[in-house]
Amino acid sequence: MGPRVLVIGGGASGLVAALTAARAGAAVTLLERGPGLGRKVLASGGGRCNLGNAGLEVGRYHGDRQFARRVLGRFGLAESLRFFEGLGLMTVQEHDGRVFPRTGQSRSVLAVLESSLNKTGADVRKGCEVTGVRARDRGFVVEAAGGGAFEADRVVLACGGASHPQLGGGELGYRLAESLGLTVSVPSPSLVPLVSKDPWVRKLAGVRVDAALSAHASGRQVAASRGELLFTAYGVSGPAALDLSREVCLALRGGAEVECRLNLFPESARPELERLLLERARTLKPLSPAALLRGALPDAVAEVFLGTLVKEIPLHESPTEEAVLTLARGLSRWRFSVCGHRPWEEAMASAGGVRPAEVSSETMEARALKGLFVAGELLDVDGDSGGFNLHFAWATGFLAGNSAAERQNAILRP
């Protein structure tokens, strides 16, 4: 009989940790406080489960990037795809590199994980809320609500972060980690929509544009992104906004004033955009700035954009060269303020968490407490949108489960 491994949390990292440990011969118990397993997995990717990305690289991660680099070096995309293929899941890669189950349904991912785990004979307890973990001379005692207790040789903390509390996210993992001597950075939302009170932003609610976006805190650039930006009734969302929201939230928490600068022509450098618009003006001889932008921007965007320049250029005259240059300047750095972010219920990930320096990147074992492992969103590493966070969950779950079962040679044979 292998070691008794108890996994706390039935999300992405917990499922993989439990399955990997059980396959390696451990006697596994998985405790999930919610009514079902993998609730965030089911909701991910708009119900399609963006489980990975061909553009996997350390630059798409934040927090402790060196830790992330070492994890990705041990369990990259090839290892992840091989793992899921071994469970019977077929995947497809889209043109932008995102990887999805071939079925287009996140429940397919959860189904192969659950069915494979059930085949191992692991003891899966749903609706079991953990209230505490105590380390003993040999092993651990895990306490549950209602007075229940479980003994284990090794414990994997895979409780997830604070994002999506309606799907099981919360602060349990942070509390357990701190009670066991680990250092926890205060969690902050990541991949969360941003709030702006600027009226013109809200006028564009429902409009999507391809753009480059940069965030500036007290005048200093803190983040930049490129992708689809969605204007909403409260501010902005979409990949371009989500990918820089981590730094925006941290800056706002620190009391900084935050401004975003929007480039509506990200494919053109500023001098190139100036030349392009001047050439359009000479060729088209437009009777107004609106006519100059017709066919270059969505009508609604052009109308609102020009409305913000009403004090700078005449809107009902043929644009002069000076007016064209003013347009180019505005189109490449259209500014709006950010005053907040949407609630945790809308955050896709968490920044902050257990300090990675206190955890081995090879085994996910806590350096100061042997037999304790940490995986997934609970660690202070978070990724961009596009499947990077789920990959990190699979990777750390696999390494933790493999190591907790004392099996060191399974990386290439998941």
Image: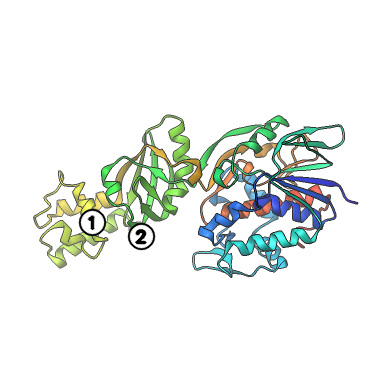
Left or right of 28? Residue 247 is left
Going by the numbered disc 2, the residue's amino acid type is Glu
| First along the sequence among labels 1 and 2 | 2
Give the label, 1 or 2, closer to the camera: 1
20 sits to left or right of 188: right
Q: Residue 302 shows which numbered tag?
A: 1
The residue labelled by disc 2 is: 267
- The spot of residue 380 in percent (x, y) is 60, 40
The residue that appears at 46% across and 38% down in the rendered structure is 249
Which numbered marker is on residue 33? none
Q: Is residue 322 above or below residue 355?
A: below
Left or right: 86 in relation to 387: right
Asked which secondary structure carries label 2, the reply is loop
View extreme (front): residue: 146
Work out how far the residue at label 1 is from the one at label 2, CA to CA, in angstroms: 18 Å
Taking depth in this image into account, of 332 and 172 the one nearest to the observer is 172
Q: Which residue occupies 24% across, 53% down?
A: 328
Q: Crowding near pointer 1: few (<14 within 10 Å), some, many (20+)?
A: some
Q: Residue furthest right?
A: 1
